[in-house]
Structures are given as C-alpha cells and as structure tokens.
Amino acid sequence: QVQLVESGGGSVQAGGSLRLSCAASGYTDVPNYMAWFRQAPGKKREGVARIYTAGGGTLYVDSVKGRFTISRDNAKNTVYLQINRLNPADTAMYYCASHLVGAGDAFAPNRYKYWGQGTQVTVSS
C-alpha cells in the first residue's frame, strides 16, 4: 500500500521559511514524478512544484518561482519543499503527490495517482 506522509508545516510569520517533507513508502514501482500542491480554503487545489525523480528536473508555477525549491533524496524516498519569504497568500494545506499519468497539464491534480493527507501552513502578517 502506497503511503505519502507530509510533515514540516506550521504557523509562521510573514518573511519566514519552512521546509516541508514528504516521505514515501509502499511503492512497487518508482514514481516518475513527485509534486507539491496546495489548497487554500474555498480555492481549487493548485500545483506549485514538480520534480522528475530520476533526473532531478524541476518545474514551478510562476507564482512561486524564486521562493520555492523542490528537491528529493531518492535513498530516503523523500521529497522536500523549501519555502522562503512566506507571505499570507501562501497559507494553505500542502499536499504531496506522486506517479504522473496520462497527458496534459503538468499540474492537473487528476494526473497524479497517489496523494498524502497534507500538512498545514499558516502565515500571519
């Protein structure tokens, strides 16, 4: 049974940083891509960063470029999201996802096969 477990969220002041982790287990096949999404109350889930697990290539949504960094440690089956210069607009539940399938938008939620339960990030001004 595949499990993705996020951690590292919390409440921080604007300007601060957080490092989110996503520990994966139970795979029978190595994921091709892993990604981070976020969902704020009343809003759609949006993808923010994606990483190709074999080669390390990354993709970011424009709104987070320069502040978010996705990385992975394949030996630990863990993906990280470093978030710097946090602002209140970053407040959301952050989810880890893996195994990109099909064709289409790189950040379409329905293209990811497995999901974690999320970790909450709250940024106060």
Image (cartoon, rainbow, N blue to C red):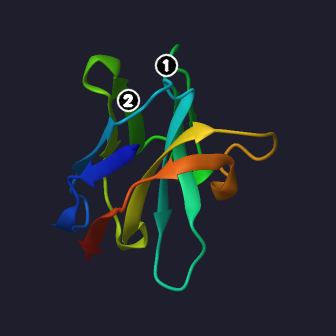
The residue at the far top in this view is 55
Q: Residue at x 18, y 66 (%)?
A: 12
Q: Is residue 102 visible?
A: yes
The answer to whether the residues at label 2 and label 1 have Cβ atoms under 8 Å apart is yes
Tell me the quarter of the image containing the N terminus.
top left
Image spot of residue 4 (x, y percent): 36, 47
Residue 54, compared with residue 31, is above or below; it is: above
Quarter where residue 106 is shown = top right
| Residue at screen point 51% across, 15% down | 54
Position in image of residue 118 (x %, y %): 35, 62
Residue 56 - label? 1
SS type, badge 2:
strand
At mark 1, the secondary structure is: loop
Calculate the distance from the C-alpha at mark 2 to the C-alpha at mark 1.
7 Å
Q: Determine crowd level at label 1: few under 14, some 14-19, many 20+ residues with C-alpha closer than 10 A.
A: some
Amino acid on which the number 1 mark rests in the picture: Gly
Q: Residue at x 19, y 65 (%)?
A: 10
- Where is 102 relative to 14, above or below? above
Image location (x, y in percent) of residue 114? 51, 48
Q: Amino acid at mark 2?
A: Ser
Quadrant holding the C terminus:
bottom left
Residue 102 is marked as none
Report the residue marked by disc 2.
71
Q: Say which label, 2 or 1, has the lower sequence index.
A: 1
* Towards the viewer: 105 or 59: 105
Q: Is residue 61 visible?
A: no
Drawn side of residue 57 relative to residue 80, left or right: right
